[in-house]
Amino acid sequence: MHNARVGGRAAVGIGVALLTLASSCSVMAQAGAALEEKGAGVLSVQSLSLLVLVLALVMLGAFASFIFTLQRRYLETCVKEHRLDLFAQSPAGLPTGTIRSMLAMMIVSLTLFFILISFLGVLNTGKEIPETLTAILGTVIGFYFGSRSGGAVPTGGEDKETNALRTTQAQAAEETDNTLDQARKVVQTGRLLTSFLPKEWAGKVESVTAQIESGIDKVEQLKKVGDALGAMKEGARAAVGNPLAEMFTKASTTFATVLGSGVPQYALIAALVGLAGRYTGTAYQKWKSRILHAPFSPAVVRLDPIDSNTGFALISASPLLMRVFQKELTEGDNPALASFANKVIKADTLAHLWQKLEPEVRERFESQAQFVEAMEGLRRAVVDQELQRITPRDALPSELEGYTGLMRKVDALYADPECEAQLHALFITIERLQKEGKSAELQAIVQQLQGETA
């Protein structure tokens, strides 16, 4: 719109200049006719024509040189001030108002020239200068200088457009800076991930991080040359990638192959992120061992002893242990069940406990490996009892059906090696980022992903 208006004004100015030249030609024609009739005059027609031609050429040459020099200096200034966008918006690559000023100068110069030679009697024709020339001169002077008299500050549409352009550029620059800050944080997180993730994960994260870094470099180059709008667009493209978000997406997609479509895509990840920041101290160590299916050693994670009723409930919840301890369950010997469970809780190693068991109890298991697996399951059940008591139900997505539902889904992932590997890498990532103080970033990414799939 700005260029269209400037172009329209320039066209009007050029029309006025042509009208001035036409009037000037009329003066020359009148002078020539008078000189031919009188056969005398101070200047001949040829001399007058040559004088006008030389004057026109000198003026055009001066204007061309002025335009070239001004355009070059204007471009250098825009580059120095990082405002190439302003140069691109300027008519003919010149400061606003330059073209109008030169047109006005040409019109005034030509008109004053012919008025001057008329007053001095150079033509000696006895005819006056056409009123058209004097009218054009008065119009140009009145319009060009009248609008600037009185010290008033210009408030025209052109100034509004200039202010609007500056506002747009400032907003674009601010948005670009914010985008760059976010992108740099993503790159920092990506580099952190590559420092501890397994090789197969680190390679993918490093590739995404490198793409974002390349985008940041492009944005910086565009900012240096003053292309704020281009920098904003390139920054938006650079901010699209996020290695952590891609990691979460891949993990949730893999989990869906086991959990099915009944569980929202990012509900399990949201629960892991939320609870990782809620547990502290011993509770967190128990939570970590529980999720990773790590052995519960009293030297590392001490479990609380259980009573008879709890022992009965935990053993009854396991099909294998119900078969192994069918006799005690049938007789209602809860103290014996609790005693056995507490031995499992306190044992340094399950292999050592296996050796100390009565032969009659050992015979109930098919092998030592089955015994160890069953006892680790019992220890996890004891941990679940403790953690469930300190975990508010509203701390988990409702689709997971509480703490028990969450653990049931976590245990189901161990049936698939790929899901197990994804779960371990995911938990390690969450833990490391929590330690680095990036809890807010984790929460923000999960919320963003959940919003995209809602």
Image (tube, rainbow, N blue to C red):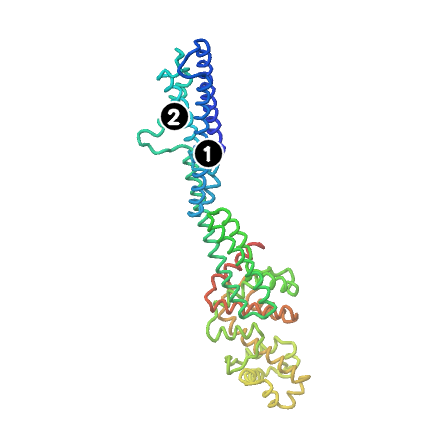
- In the picture of the structure, the residue carrying the numbered disc 1 is 64
Q: Please name the amino acid that badge 1 sits on.
A: Ala
Q: On the picture, is 127 further left or further right than 301?
A: left
Instruction: Give the Cα separation between the discs numbered 1 and 2.
Output: 24 Å
Q: Please name the amino acid that badge 2 sits on.
A: Phe
Q: Earlier in the sequence, mark 1 or mark 2?
A: 1
Q: Position of residue 8 (x, y in %)?
A: 48, 29
Q: In this orientation, which residue lies closer to the viewer: 409 or 211?
A: 211
Q: In this orientation, which residue lies closer to the viewer: 221 or 31?
A: 31
| Residue at image location 46% in from the left, 14% down from the top | 32
Q: Is residue 399 visible?
A: no
Q: Position of residue 92 (x, y in %)?
A: 48, 36
- In the picture of the structure, the residue carrying the numbered disc 2 is 143
For mark 2, does the 10 Å Cα neighbourhood hold few (<14), some (14 to 19), or many (20 or more) residues? few
Q: On the picture, is 323 further left or further right than 105?
A: right
Residue 377 figure quarter: bottom right
Residue at the extreme left of the image, as rendered:
150
